Amino acid sequence: MRILMWHVHGSWTTSFVSGGHEVLLPVLPDRGPDGQGRARTWSWPQTAQEITPDDLRDADIDLVVLQRPHEIELAHRWTGRRPGTELPAVYVEHDTPRETASATRHPVADRDDITLVHVTHFNHVMWDNGTAPTTVIEHGVADPGDRYTGADPSAAVVVNHPVRRGRLVGADLMIDLARHLPVHVYGMGMSELTGHAAFPVARLHDDLPQSRMHQQLAHHRMYFHPYRWTSLGLALLEAMALGLPVLGLSTTEGPRAVPPEAGLLSNSMAEIRTRARHWLDDPAAARAAGAHARKHVLEHYSLPQFHDRWNCLLNRIT
């Protein structure tokens, strides 16, 4: 199948393009949000191909995967075909509603020709989906192998642009934990934290290639997921797959993704700090929790399951 899709979320796209389909990724000279093309920090197969807007007009496309509201008009303008009516389309919703969950209507809620796919069950019930045909296809992550050592008595966090995104991603909670134990931060925009007393430069890791980031994550004693109100982060599942035990808030999809044996989800930072200190003092306990985390991810968020669910949907729509 030939699928048109914009490169929006790197980790999710990494999972999707590994499914064997030919995926056409728009590319622009500036590689801006509407034309990022192929990833430069992930390893993608050759079936993920860059294509210019000019070439899209005559391209043979079976389906478009939409991820942002303006892509409906963009796809029509660049391909000459209307998503939903002239070109089979699905809309993947990656996020929780930004405003009041009980009163936020989804951008495609009034369309019956575009299937709305939520990546978590939490998102599915928080958005007002209207009459749009709706389903849930949960995340899938590639098995990176059990790499956990826990040799570094510290916590790891993966978050992009923590200062700019602030409380949404729990930047204040990350800083709070860093006052009590070493916390290393991975992601884009680490320069925003340069000079912060809680984060010496050696604990900031800016935009590393995925393989290198995984290698380094595995050496930390634990993973902290501080997000307050976002969809389930793939970085959390990847850390669990590496064998790291997990700390985080009991919000959004977290309670479904992290069983009690795999760590602690709590809205009490005092409880989170207590568990963190316990794992610092008892590496064996941290390793045992991490083993449960890895087992859970491989059973519930495997890449083959993800691809099977997507293939069933795509075959039904096309």
Image (cartoon, rainbow, N blue to C red):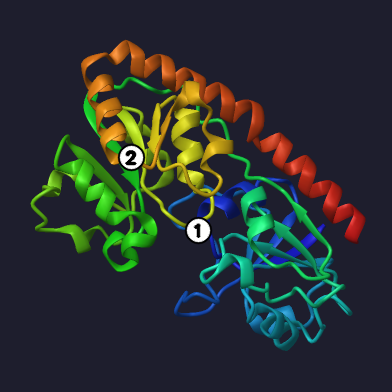
The residue closer to the viewer here, 259 or 314, is 259
Residue 160 falls left or right of residue 73: left
Residue 136, placed above or below residue 246: below
Image position, residue 288 (x, y; %): 42, 14
Residue at the image point whose x is 35% and y is 19% from the top? 286
Q: Amino acid at mark 1?
A: Ala
Q: Is residue 120 visible?
A: no
Between label 1 and label 2, give the one nearer the viewer: 2
* Identity of the residue furthest to the top in this view: 284
Q: Is residue 105 visible?
A: yes
- Circle on res. 39: 1
**Dot placed on the residue nearer the N-terminal end, 1 or 2:** 1
Residue at the image point whose x is 30% and y is 22% from the top? 150
Q: Amino acid at mark 2?
A: Ser
Image position, residue 59 (x, y; %): 78, 75
The residue closer to the viewer here, 286 or 73, is 286
Q: Quadrant of the N terminus?
A: bottom right
- Circle on res. 268: 2
Residue 112 falls left or right of residue 306: right
1 and 2 marks in contact (CB < 8 Å): no
Residue at the image point whose x is 74% and y is 47% from the top? 20
Label 2: element kind: loop
Residue 296, placed above or below residue 159: above
